[in-house]
Image: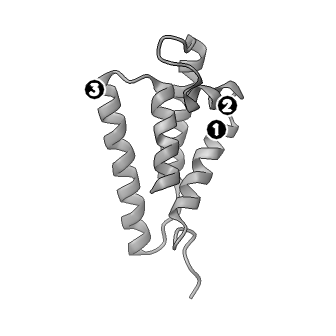
Amino acid sequence: MPQSPLHGGLRAAACLAWLAALASLAPHTAAAAAGACGAAACTAEQLSRCRQANEMMQEQLRQLPASGPADRERKAALQARVQAMLAEHRRKGVDACTTWGEMGRIAANQ
């Protein structure tokens, strides 16, 4: 029986989703997401691009394939973790570039 793309590889799939979102944005977004600009130092354009990257990452996560029950559970858990982090960051007023960096850490470390 063929394995699902997420079987044993949800981390890789999530990282690829994060990288796909990153690749479609201007190069300086990566530096902003990595903390190269603080909330006061990020330009409006950088913050806008980080917000766009956050939205793209959420869409990429929704599109991750999940063929079996275990894959669907892992995918749902990852999406819930990202949504909880987004809600917390919005509540605390965390800037979009810091949020983007956290999304990348979640994707890489889940």
Q: Position of residue 75 (x, y in %)?
A: 42, 60
Q: Amino acid at mark 3?
A: Arg
Left or right, 107 with reference to 17: left
Q: Position of residue 79 (x, y in %)?
A: 39, 51
Question: Label 1: which residue?
Answer: 22
Tell me residue 84's x, y (percent). 31, 42
Q: Are marks 2 and 3 in contact (CB under 8 Å)?
A: no
How many numbered tags mark residues here? 3
Q: Earlier in the sequence, mark 1 or mark 3?
A: 1
**SS state under label 2:** loop
Q: Amino acid at mark 1?
A: Leu
Residue 6: x %, y % from top left = 53, 68
Q: Which quarter of the rendering shows the N terminus?
A: bottom right
Tell me the residue at 50%/18% (across/down).
Answer: 38
Mark 3 lies on residue: 91
Give the residue number, with chain letter if any, for mark 2.
Answer: 25
Q: What is the CA distance from the residue labelled 2 to the residue labelled 3?
A: 26 Å
Label 1 neighbour load within 10 Å: few <14, some 14-19, many 20+? many
Instruction: Compare residues 11 and 58 and report the one nearer the observer.
Output: 11
